[in-house]
Image (cartoon, rainbow, N blue to C red):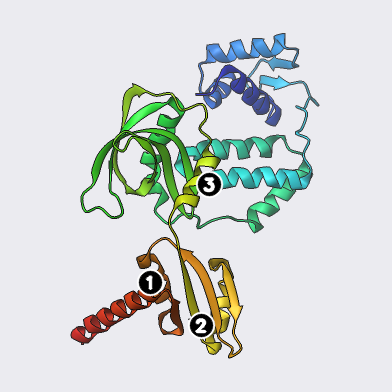
Amino acid sequence: MPNTATRLINLIMLLQKRPNQKAADLAHELGVSVRTLHRYINMLDQMGLPVYSERGPQGGFSLVRGYRMPPLVFSPEEAVAVYLGVSLVEEMWGRVYRGAARGAQAKLDNVLPDEQRHEIAWARRALLATGMHRTNLEALAPVLEKLRKAAREHRRVHMTYQGKEKRQPSQRDMDPYALVHRWGWWYAVGFCHLRQELRTFRVDRITGLTLMDTLFNPPTDFDLRTYLDSEAGTQPLMTVKLRFQPQVAQVAQENYTAWEKVEKQPDGCVEVTFAAPTLEWAASTALAYGPIVEVVEPAELRQLVSTWAEAILQRYSEAR
């Protein structure tokens, strides 16, 4: 809920935007009663802000002509950076922070000088960050809202979680320390009371979530970035090498961000190396390129891709 200071700032902006506004209209904009609105006007007067009122059908509250709140001192590039940051919050969080993000944009539009506003208008047309989620963000919003509330208020949650390798979902209590977005997915990091250790849970695999009344105290030495770095370092990875034939070598080079190493061979082939968490994950990557790629190593991956390919051929042969 907005506090008094925030409402006073919003009231100044409303008065600055248009003179002779009725008390009832201002109260409606601020979400307060007319009586409270008059109290806010008196507070502004005591603070020395030049607010005056005129009676009559065309009258209302106004700021003294020429009075302006000091503009935020931003260069055009800084103003764009702030706008892009606000836009990114809305893209990442959806409805969880949509109202706050749009409110911040409106305030920027209201107080920035014309040069910065024109630069932001250009950025709105020409600079866009989208497609960051690998799942439906709107469907995740209810769970994200509860997790954000639980992490903010240090409240334990009870959840139904469908693990990747599990046929049946598990029931567990968790103390959520933080929410993380990476690799296109949302994750909750917290202490799992079922496993009695710090764990990471993919939010789209949480099929039920209830906020509990039990409170918890996060460890004072918990650092999210340090935890994420250590988690990545302990995840077992295998090294995979694929070979692209000369006629399709450009495909490998165009996707260079997916590889740790790209090596062009004397015969024109391109061999790429990358780290994979599981054989199945590596096989899926290899098969995504169809017949234009060959697995060089490891041998067990070559065998798995061959097995899958034979099964695929058998299934489509039966369909014919």
Height in image: 311 above or below 180? Answer: below
Residue at 41% across, 34% down: 176
- Residue 129: x and y in percent read 58, 55
> Gap between marks 1 and 3, in whole Å?
26 Å
Residue in the picture at 45% in, 27% down: 218
Viewer-proximal residue among 304 and 26: 304
Q: In this rendered view, identify the residue nearer to me: 7 or 131.
A: 131
Callout 2 crowding tier (Cα within 10 Å): few <14, some 14–19, many ≥20: many
Q: Amino acid at mark 3?
A: Asp
Residue at 41% of width from left, 80% of height from top? 290
| Residue hosting label 3 | 229
Q: Amino acid at mark 2?
A: Phe
> Please, which residue is most extreme toward the front here?
299
Secondary structure found at label 2: strand
Residue marked by disc 2 = 244
* Residue mark closest to the camera, 3 vs 2: 3
